[in-house]
Amino acid sequence: MGTSGRQDWPDFRAVDKAFAEGDMTALLQALGEPGDFPRAPVALGPGLGENPLEYAIYWSPVAFVAELLERGADPSRPDPAGFPPVIAALSSERPERLKIIALLLEHGADVAQRGINDWTPLHYAVAQGDLAGAALLLEHGADPGLRTRIDHCTSALEDAEAAGFEEAAALLRGALSR
């Protein structure tokens, strides 16, 4: 029985430890050897969600994120809370976040996938003041002119200009002129 008292939850501590240590064998054992892992949703435990890639983005070594992607984790899996994988990586504030974002993009993540506030990852990077993240996204084809479809329907460039984030605005203008 898991730590929540529910028969159907895996052991939270074992799952969390396996993610933190990047131990695939221990993770699969703690989860009860789920089929189609990591492509199919799997109950990771109370408060852990059901997306192994998302949890790994926040808590696992970069090599473990890469292993999940190699095993078929979807780098563009929608997230009901508005944090699909690339936006989740941008939000993590981990020192390795750029490596994780690059891995996601190399494995086919949608550089224009919408998330919270209908933002693309580029909108999110601008909102976070993440110039390095914005540059990486542009290198992978992010469109600085793409607008949100709600609220003020702004582009990442317009958001950078409105926020006075001049370094990002200059970078985005340069990308538009190519």
Image (spheres, rainbow, N blue to C red):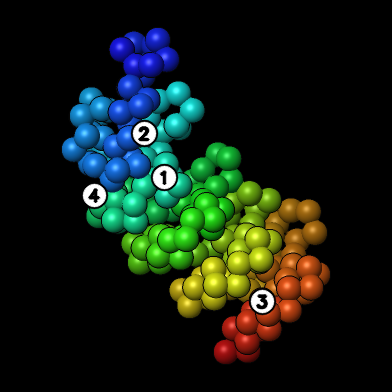
> Which residue is identified by label 3?
168
Determine the residue positioned at 70% across, 57% down.
149
Q: Residue furthest bottom?
A: 178
In the rendered image, which quarter is residue 153 located in?
A: bottom right
Q: Secondary structure beneath disc 1?
A: helix
Q: Is residue 44 visible?
A: yes
* Residue 8, percent from left and from top: 34, 15
**Distance (Cα) linking label 1 and label 3:** 28 Å
* Mark in the foreground, 4 or 3: 3
> Which residue is identified by label 1?
59
Determine the residue positioned at 40% across, 10% down.
5
> Height in image: 67 above or below 23?
below
**Distance (Cα) linking label 4 and label 3:** 35 Å
Q: Secondary structure beneath disc 2?
A: helix
- Picture quarter with the C terminus: bottom right
> Which residue is identified by label 4?
71
The tag earlier along the polypeptide, 1 or 2, is 2
> Height in image: 55 above or below 114?
above
**Number of residue marks:** 4
* Residue 154, percent from left and from top: 74, 65
* Mark in the foreground, 2 or 3: 2
Q: Are marks 1 and 2 in contact (CB under 8 Å)?
A: yes
Q: Secondary structure beneath disc 3?
A: helix
**Mark 1: which amino acid?**
Trp
The tag earlier along the polypeptide, 1 or 3, is 1
In the rendered image, which quarter is residue 162 located in?
A: bottom right
In the rendered image, which quarter is residue 126 located in?
A: bottom right
The residue nearer to you, when weighing 176 against 25, is 25
The tag earlier along the polypeptide, 2 or 3, is 2
The tag earlier along the polypeptide, 2 or 4, is 2
> Which residue is identified by label 2?
16
Sort mark 4 into few (<14), some (14-19) or many (20+) by Cα contacts within 10 Å.
few
